[in-house]
Image: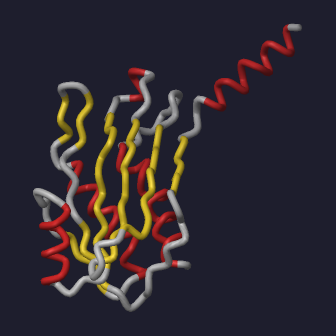
Amino acid sequence: MRGWFSGLAALLLLAGCTSVKSVDTVSAQAVLERSGAALIGVSPDGRYNATVYHGSGQLVSSLVLTAFAPHLSKVEIGKPWPDQAAALAEARERGARYLILPNILHWEDRATAWSGLPDRATVLLTVIEVETGAVLDTATIDGRSAIVTFLSETPQDLLREPIKQYARQVSGA
């Protein structure tokens, strides 16, 4: 009995030591052409209750740029637009074929090593064909840090690899 309980406790401890990262796509059938250029929007900064994480919208846009740059001819970051129509208008002006709009749905940056509360981030990515305005694909990307950790991960650390995975997926790489 004692060995069984020790084994269960060790398993739970190990489970608490791993980060969870996932990508949930709607269609994942959109294949972006390498010759196409993309313009990336800037999400409003993430919030959790009354806390606003200033600069998080720009951080997410930078992650998206880094992830998509190897798969497209040109990738640039735009600005926070008031609506999708304004974003599409600027993308057309800049000659972009794709518009990628990140939207931070959830953002918690915690001192996990001391508090035991995990960092969490959820971002919605929408890929739009600029010429037609058609949504080619959407993805919800989640990250949650380990509860038991000696390293401090930030929400952007949790999103880096899943966003790269998504960029490879929709570019057919």
Give x and y (percent) for residue 56. Answer: 23, 48
Q: Residue at x 39, y 23 (%)?
A: 114
Give x and y (percent) for residue 23. Answer: 52, 53
What colour scheme does the image use?
secondary structure
Q: Residue at x 34, y 62 (%)?
A: 63
Give x and y (percent) for residue 79. Answer: 13, 64
In which image quadrant can residue 45 be found?
A: top left
Residue 112 left/right relative to 147:
left
The N terminus, quarter of image? top right
> Which residue occupies the foreground of this view, 88 or 76?
88
Q: Is residue 149 above or below residue 140?
A: above
> Which residue occupies the foreground of this view, 65 or 42?
42
Extreme residue toward the right, this view: 1
Extreme residue toward the bottom, this view: 35
In which image quadrant can residue 91 be found?
A: bottom left
Whether residue 43 is visible to the viewer of this picture, yes or no, is yes
Give x and y (percent) for residue 162. Answer: 49, 57
Q: Is residue 141 above or below residue 118?
A: below
Whether residue 168 is visible to the viewer of this picture, yes or no, is no
Q: Is residue 105 above or below residue 96?
A: above
Q: Residue at x 34, y 71 (%)?
A: 134
